[in-house]
Amino acid sequence: MKLIDLPAQKEILWHRMRSDLISLVPWFADNDLLLCPTCCRPIGYDDSSVEHIVPKQALACDPPEVREAIPQNERSGLTLLCAKPLIIKGKRVPGNGCNSWKGKYYDPCLRELLNADFQTKRINSRHQVSLYCAGYLALVRQFGYQVALSQTGLLSRNQFFHPNTFLSEVPLTCQMMLTGGRRSDFSDDDRSYWSNPFSISIDGPTALIVLRNIGFRVPLSHDPSQPISRVLQYAPSKYAFRPDLRTVFE
């Protein structure tokens, strides 16, 4: 099944991500900008581009009955990335920003992983970093900018621009993957395997993510499934501007 109304999807994503960003950074309400989830540059609507987290080239290898039953957008998971050229170490990078960066460095590896026979396939660091970055984008897609703007979000955004090896700060538990046999047919009982590309559960300081038949972890600074307190739960002490000499047990 072909893409369904991709321009409308971009507008829906734009307003949803803008609303989430403004809830965390209120002064963005004064402009018409969004932060790219990977480079964190402010971008306008025209400088943003719809990105398939699971690349279209990988989805093209799905069984014909899957492609007929489930739209491509649903099987991929959509987000917005910047399409403005990147400047790295003072040099302009050819292509359309983070969208092109992901397409160049990560999409071919993700296609290989989703169609691999892991009993014979040799996995390298680029494959694992590709999986990690896709997992990070899946977390931002599900939980919003609270993931991107956290300390571990900064780590993941830095990792996005180091495609060939893991940064030393990435926990070792997030530098490995567990795999199983991939499915090659379609039935209504296993529809979620194809239609919901990422299954995410929070496990302490990491998110356990399953992309079809591959499991891996991405670090987290906090549990993004828990609501963020936006009001102080206590009032400032009346002694805030003078010494408070009371003892703890008084």
Image (cartoon, rainbow, N blue to C red):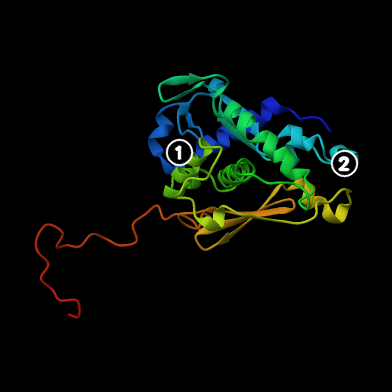
Q: Secondary structure at mark 2?
A: loop
Structural crowding at the residue carrying mark 2, measured as other residues with C-alpha within 10 Å and reported as few (<14), some (14–19) or many (≥20): few
Label drawn at residue 22:
1
- Viewer-side residue, 216 vs 34: 216
| Outermost bottom residue | 249
CA distance separating discs 2 and 1: 41 Å
Q: Position of residue 4 (x, y in %)?
A: 76, 30
Q: Position of residue 141 (x, y in %)?
A: 59, 43
Q: Is residue 196 above or below residue 237?
A: above
Q: Residue at x 56, y 31 (%)?
A: 81
Q: Is residue 91 left or right of residue 16?
A: left
The three-letter code of the residue at mark 2 reads: Pro
Q: Is residue 37 visible?
A: no
Q: Earlier in the sequence, mark 2 or mark 1?
A: 1
Q: Residue at x 63, y 29 (%)?
A: 104
Label drawn at residue 63:
2
- Viewer-side residue, 157 vs 2: 157
Q: Secondary structure at mark 1?
A: helix
Q: Is residue 175 visible?
A: yes
Q: Position of residue 238 (x, y in %)?
A: 17, 62
Residue 69 picture quarter: top right
Quadrant of image for the C terminus:
bottom left
